[in-house]
């Protein structure tokens, strides 16, 4: 069954198909029930807005006020005509939030999202406590304001919470040793920044914590090699050393 079209070369969206696709996307992204429903609701609302625009353009075209070969489409709806880009993985606290937020913004900009769209969809890419934080405190009107609020709130996270992120770090299949070491180092560096000067850890202590974590989590084949080499610095634990 085809969707209604007109001489402008655009078609109305089938809301049932939009809902089905949004649900599939949410499932593929591993969203929980609340985030899934929010994602579906946003997709359907946006599709309805698009259909309203379609109806308005069709009416104007029939009245002769719009030339079929040059349709005027609202900038806020241009993203519906773009190819979907790969958004960053949902933020779970294991990476630097400022860096993650920049990637989210850059990808959203490339997709043509407006500031309001980036703000309203930010929650779909946050997990657990971070989603709750956004849902509770972000006004969801402009991305700039929401990003500023989230950055401020995460900057106030206690040192213990940052250390928990390090302890929760796991070795995923196909993990690159260099990537793992960089991620672990970033987590402990953020933790160390929160400590008072008299409690800050030395670089040697940070390296030892990271190496212990690497040896504990690495696959059996890698563990044997690491124990044999007994590296004392992160640079000695990397690939090809």
Image (tube, rainbow, N blue to C red):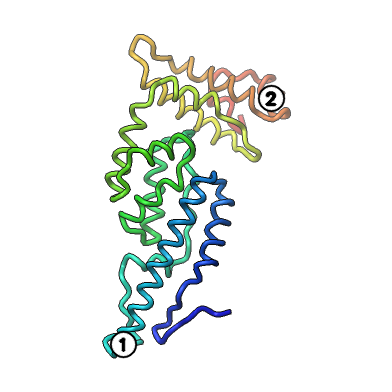
- The circle on residue 223 is 2
Q: Is residue 7 left or right of residue 229?
A: left
Residue 7 vertical placement versus 224 (above, below): below
Q: Give the labeled residue for mark 1.
A: 67
Residue at horizontal 62%, vertical 36%?
172
Q: What SS does tag 1 mark?
A: loop
Residue at horizontal 56%, vertical 61%?
20
15 or 229: nearer the viewer:
15
Q: Is residue 101 left or right of residue 36?
A: left
Residue 11 vertical placement versus 230 (above, below): below
How busy is the neighbourhood of tag 2: few (under 14 within 10 Å), some, or many (20 plus)? some
Residue 94, position in %: x, y?
49, 33
Residue 176 vertical placement versus 106 (above, below): above
Marks 1 and 2: in contact by CB < 8 Å?
Answer: no
- The circle on residue 148 is none
Choose the circle earlier in sequence order: 2 or 1. Answer: 1
Residue 88, position in %: x, y?
47, 48
Tag in front: 2 or 1:
1
The quarter of the displayed image where residue 201 is located: top left
Q: Is residue 177 left or right of residue 81?
A: right
How busy is the neighbourhood of tag 1: few (under 14 within 10 Å), some, or many (20 plus)? few
Q: Is residue 35 left or right of residue 214?
A: left
Quadrant of the drawing holding the C terminus: top right
70 or 64: nearer the viewer:
64
Residue 2, position in %: x, y?
55, 80
Residue at horizontal 48%, vertical 62%?
84
The quarter of the displayed image where residue 129 is located: top left
Residue 121, position in %: x, y?
40, 51
Q: What SS does tag 2 mark?
A: helix
Residue 147 vertical placement versus 6 (above, below): above
């Amino acid at each position: 069954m085809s969707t209604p079209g007109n001489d402008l070369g655009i078609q109305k969206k089938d809301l049932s198909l939009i809902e089905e696709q949004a649900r599939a996307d949410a499932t593929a992204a591993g969203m929980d029930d609340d985030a899934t429903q929010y994602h579906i609701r946003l997709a359907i609302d946006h599709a309805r807005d698009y259909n309203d625009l379609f109806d308005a353009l069709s009416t104007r075209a029939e009245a002769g006020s719009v030339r079929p070969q040059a349709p005027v489409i609202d900038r806020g709806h241009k993203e519906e005509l773009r190819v979907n880009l790969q958004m960053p993985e949902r933020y779970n606290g294991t990476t630097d939030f400022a860096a993650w937020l920049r990637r989210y913004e850059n990808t959203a900009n490339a997709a043509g999202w407006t500031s309001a769209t980036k703000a309203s969809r930010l929650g779909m890419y946050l997990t657990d406590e971070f989603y709750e934080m956004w849902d509770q405190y972000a006004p969801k009107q402009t991305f700039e304001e929401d990003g500023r609020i989230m950055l401020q709130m995460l900057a106030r996270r206690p040192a213990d919470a940052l250390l928990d992120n390090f302890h929760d770090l796991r070795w995923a299949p196909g993990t690159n040793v260099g990537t793992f070491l960089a991620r672990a180092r970033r987590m402990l560096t953020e933790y160390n920044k929160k400590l008072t000067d008299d409690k800050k850890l030395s670089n040697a202590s940070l390296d030892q914590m990271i190496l212990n974590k690497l040896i504990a989590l690495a696959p059996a084949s890698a563990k044997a090699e690491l124990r044999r080499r007994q590296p004392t610095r992160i640079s000695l634990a990397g690939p090809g050393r």
